[in-house]
Each structure stands twice: as C-alpha cells, then as structure tokens.
Image: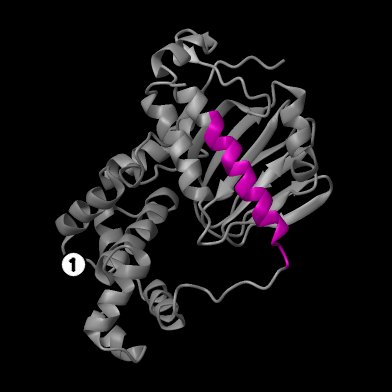
C-alpha cells in the first residue's frame, strides 16, 4: 500500500510549523556555538543543568577538569560534561583556541537511558582524523544558522548520530590505530614552516629538504592539507600576525616586517583575505571588553556565523 508523503507529514506533531520527531531516544539542543578564545581564557568552575559536548579541533596546552580529573587537550578531542558536574576549562596560555560546543538534554527517559552508560563513562575522547564527528558538528551549526525547513529536527537527528559515532570512538580507545594519514615528510615540512615564519621559505628548497621533488611535494601537500604549501605558509603567518596584533603593541607595519613582509600593503591584503577582516579592525575588535575572551575566527572557512550563540527554544523538563 502506498503512503502519501504529504499526508504523512501532516500527521506528525509540530511546534510552530516544525515537525517534532516522535522518537523517544532523540536529544534536544538548547545552545550551540563555535568560539575562538583568547590565550589564557578561563571557563568555570561551574555546573550546568544539561549535558555539554565540546569539540576542540586542534591540540593545544588547554586543560579540562571534571570529577576531580584533569585532561590535557593536546590533540583533536571531545569533552563530555554531565548535568550537575563541576568542571573547568583553562585555555592555552600562549595561543587562541577554537572550540565548538553543544548543550543538550533528553526530553524522554528512553533517550537518557540509551546513552547513560556512555555519557557517564567518558569525559575525554580523542577524535581521529578520519572521524565524521567534526563534519557532523559543523553541519549542526550550519543548520542552526540557516534555519531551513525542520532545522531543529534535523539537528536532533544529527546529534543522535554524532553521539553514536562518539560511542564507537570511545569503544576503540586503547585499541591499535592505523598509521597516521599525513606522511612524516609533510609533517616535517609544516614543522619547518612553523619554525621559520619570519624568514623567506622557498617551496623548492623545502621539498628538497624533505627529499621530494617540488612537483610531488606540492601535489601531496595539497592532497593532505587541502591547500598548496605556499598558501598554508601564508595562513600560518597570518595566525601568528593575529596573535601579535592582540598581545603586542607594535604597529601593523612593524608586525609585517617582523614576519618577513617588506610590503605592508601586501601583508594587509593577505591578512584580510585569510582572516576576513583588516588587521587594524582585528586588533580593535579584540580590544573591545565584550570580546576579551574570544578571537575572531576565519569565518570564510565555515558556512555559519562564528563567535555566535545559537538557541533552540527547547524548555528543560
């Protein structure tokens, strides 16, 4: 017997025109965001009335403390906070740190029981480079920003799937892992870039340094990092420039010179192309007391607003 999709949709419960998932296992979001915190920022000690997932896409000297245990967030990872749990996050004292977070609860007892042993058994979960979790987290934020048809329902379904992926990742903690995807010579190349940000770096010489031809190096680097090595170097320099703009009193011209740019105007164009805002405006925004614990991210890298809270209007039971 065929089913009329429109009639079936009409039979679903709704809130203000949006379908509500009848599945009793579905979680509901109350708050999400993607923020970049200034070096040395601190959150807590505090408690929440709901669960919170926090994704740290890069390793840093940030630490997270909950239930009396402290975790070094020195790799891409997820932290889990439970309702009523005293916790604290001390962000890296020397560099800005980006983190994506989702606060949620289970409106039905079935959902809480389904995930209870997992959520209450783990605080820190490393996130592998092959994990779909980062893309799922970013898509939740994208849906929350765009607010298309049934966006809240879609966010709940994505969060359910994300929790299942994390459950599987937690089960594999301690198991033998496959060899890292990024070849060691490329890691050597990036390390060299990071140690020579203020010096001229020839891509041909860098390829020779790691024992590869220039052509192969450029193709392999782009395949693994999603951009050519010269652009990656420029991005690293602009991240360093951003830190200097916030924590140094040197002028834009002096910072440009210190990073090896003879032409201040070229530096300014590159900074705006990568960061999406001028160097002067970046410094002024960071000095605003309302933003004293956040740093402007590269909004062009993601299809949603960063340093912005998304709310869902779901009342806690």
Task: Rate crowding at label 1 as few (under 14), some (14 to 19) or many (20 or more) other CA atoms within 10 Å.
Answer: few
Residue farthest along the right direction in this orientation: 68
Name the residue nearer the viewer: 9 or 177. Answer: 9
Which segment is the magenta one? 156-174
Judged left or right of residue 48, residue 15 is left
Give the answer, above or below, for where 148 lies relative to 193: above
At 56% from the left edge and 58% from the top edge, which residue is drawn?
Answer: 76
Residue 80 placement (x, y as % from top left): 69, 43
Look at the image and tell me whether residue 290 can be seen.
yes
At 22% from the left edge and 50% from the top edge, which residue is drawn?
Answer: 273
Can residue 140 be found in the magenta stretch?
no
Residue 302 placement (x, y as % from top left): 36, 43
Residue 274 placement (x, y as % from top left): 27, 52
Name the residue nearer the viewer: 181 or 194. Answer: 181
What residue did someone put label 1 on? 262
At 25% from the left edge and 44% from the top edge, which residue is drawn?
Answer: 278
Judged left or right of residue 22, residue 276 is left
At 70% from the left edge and 55% from the top edge, which residue is drawn?
Answer: 170
Judged left or right of residue 314, residue 19 is left
Across the whole image, how many numbered discs are drawn on residues? Answer: 1
């Amino acid at each position: 017997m065929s089913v009329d999709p429109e009639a079936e949709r009409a039979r679903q419960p709704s809130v203000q025109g949006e379908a509500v998932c009848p599945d009793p296992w579905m979680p509901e979001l109350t708050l999400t965001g993607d923020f970049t915190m200034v070096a040395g920022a601190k959150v807590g000690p505090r408690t929440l009335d709901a669960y919170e997932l926090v994704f740290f896409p890069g390793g840093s000297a940030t630490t997270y403390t909950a239930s009396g245990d402290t975790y070094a967030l020195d790799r891409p990872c997820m932290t889990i906070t439970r309702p009523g749990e005293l916790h604290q996050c001390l962000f890296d004292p020397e560099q800005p740190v980006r983190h994506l977070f989702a606060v949620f609860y289970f409106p039905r007892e079935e959902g809480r029981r389904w995930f209870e042993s997992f959520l209450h058994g783990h605080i820190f979960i490393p996130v592998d480079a092959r994990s779909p979790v980062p893309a799922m987290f970013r898509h939740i934020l994208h849906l929350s920003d765009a607010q298309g048809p049934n966006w809240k329902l879609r966010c709940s379904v994505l969060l359910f799937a994300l929790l299942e992926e994390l459950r599987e990742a937690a089960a594999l903690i301690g198991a033998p892992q496959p060899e890292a995807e990024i070849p060691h010579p490329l890691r050597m190349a990036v390390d060299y870039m990071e140690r020579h940000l203020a010096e001229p770096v020839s891509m041909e010489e860098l390829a020779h340094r790691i024992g590869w031809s220039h052509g192969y190096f450029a193709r392999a680097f782009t395949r693994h990092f999603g951009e050519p090595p010269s652009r990656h170097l420029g991005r690293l320099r602009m991240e360093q420039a951003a830190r200097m703009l916030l924590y140094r009193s040197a002028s834009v011209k002096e910072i440009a010179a210190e990073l090896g740019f003879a032409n201040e105007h070229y530096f300014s164009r590159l900074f705006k192309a990568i960061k999406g805002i001028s160097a002067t405006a970046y410094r002024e925004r960071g000095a605003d007391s309302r933003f004293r614990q956040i740093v402007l991210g590269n909004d062009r890298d993601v299809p949603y607003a960063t340093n912005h809270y998304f709310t869902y209007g779901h009342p806690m039971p």
